[in-house]
Image (cartoon, coloured by chain):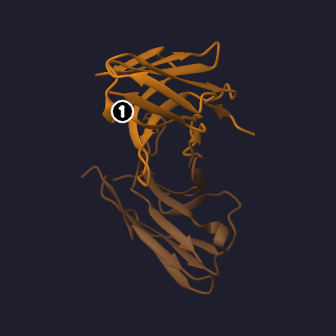
């Protein structure tokens, strides 16, 4: 039962353009959402998060948008850089719970 | 110090061996986690420790035995593993509390190969 889904396993974008990674969830109890970036053979690195009381959070080139009614969030990276090439996981948690529910990941390739 | 460290980085063991994975953090986090990650899959939660007590065991086989000696250390003892247990084992830590975000910080992982 995959409560967090990333339906695009891969995405290729030209350097300098915008990368948009999407994530959907089914559990309406989730109130905190995170994006992680992962290089091969390394642990995930926390990128950005958003609470359900917001619909947007921005940090430099990274912006996360949350649409609670659609149970959808997205990560925008602009401008995309070759070093952004990695697997991106979205994750969600419910109030009072420590555990995160991860999506299946999207492999982003930024083409120089 | 905003780092989670894990040792060893790589481990090869036979099915009859006993080994341990170690994890350490000095961020004052009171929740620590073990995850298992197979290639092209998301991290899969194994155990959660909150305030040094085991709070979640995701039906993990008893050949995996976690231990939390203190608030900074987390071990995973391995015994009689199977080849299908080969994976990247990730440790993570986070704060606990409803007023905090649940950002978990991950270590680099231990790449385990069971022969």
Horizontal relation, residue A7 to residue A35: left or right: right
Quadrant of the snapshot with the C terminus of chain B: bottom right
Tell me which residue sits at (42%, 36%) in the image.
Answer: B100
Tell me which residue sits at (65%, 14%) in the image.
Answer: A70
Q: Which percent across, then down, holds residue A56? A: 43, 15
Q: Based on the displayed image, in which of its 4 quarters is residue A110 positioned?
A: top left
Mark 1 neighbour density, 10 Å: few (under 14) some (14–19) many (20 or more): some
**Residue that protrudes farthest toward the front in the picture:** A112
According to the picture, the residue beneath numbered tag 1 turns out to be: A84
Q: Which percent across, then down, holds residue A51? A: 48, 24
Q: SS class of the residue under badge 1?
A: helix
Say if A34 sits above or below B43 in the image.
Answer: above
Q: Which of the chains is brown?
A: B
Residue A76 visible in this rendered orientation of the protein: yes
**Residue that protrudes farthest toward the left in the picture:** B1
Chain for numbered disc 1: A
Q: Which percent across, then down, holds residue B70? A: 40, 68
Give the colour of chain A.
Answer: orange
Q: Based on the displayed image, in which of its 4 quarters is residue A68 positioned?
A: top right
């Amino acid at each position: 039962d995959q409560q967090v889904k990333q339906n695009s396993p891969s995405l290729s974008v030209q350097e300098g353009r915008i990368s948009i990674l999407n994530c959907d969830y089914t559990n309406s109890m989730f109130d905190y959402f995170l994006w992680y970036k992962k290089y091969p053979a390394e642990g995930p690195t926390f990128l950005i998060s958003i609470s359900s009381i917001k619909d947007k959070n921005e940090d430099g080139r990274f912006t996360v948008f949350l649409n609670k009614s659609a149970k959808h969030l997205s990560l925008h990276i602009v401008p995309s850089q070759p070093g952004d090439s990695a697997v991106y996981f979205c994750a969600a948690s419910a109030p009072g719970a420590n555990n995160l529910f991860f999506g299946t990941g999207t492999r982003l390739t930024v083409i120089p | 110090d905003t780092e989670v460290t894990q040792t060893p980085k790589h481990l090869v063991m036979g099915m009859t061996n006993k080994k341990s994975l170690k994890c350490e953090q000095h961020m004052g986090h009171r929740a620590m986690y073990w995850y298992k990650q197979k290639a092209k899959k998301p991290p899969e939660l194994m155990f959660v420790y909150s305030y040094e007590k085991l709070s979640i065991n995701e039906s993990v086989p008893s050949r995996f035995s976690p231990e939390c000696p203190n608030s900074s250390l987390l071990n995973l003892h391995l015994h009689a593993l199977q080849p299908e247990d080969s994976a990247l084992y990730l440790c993570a830590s986070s704060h606990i509390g409803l007023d905090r975000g649940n950002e978990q910080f991950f270590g680099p992982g231990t790449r385990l190969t069971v022969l």
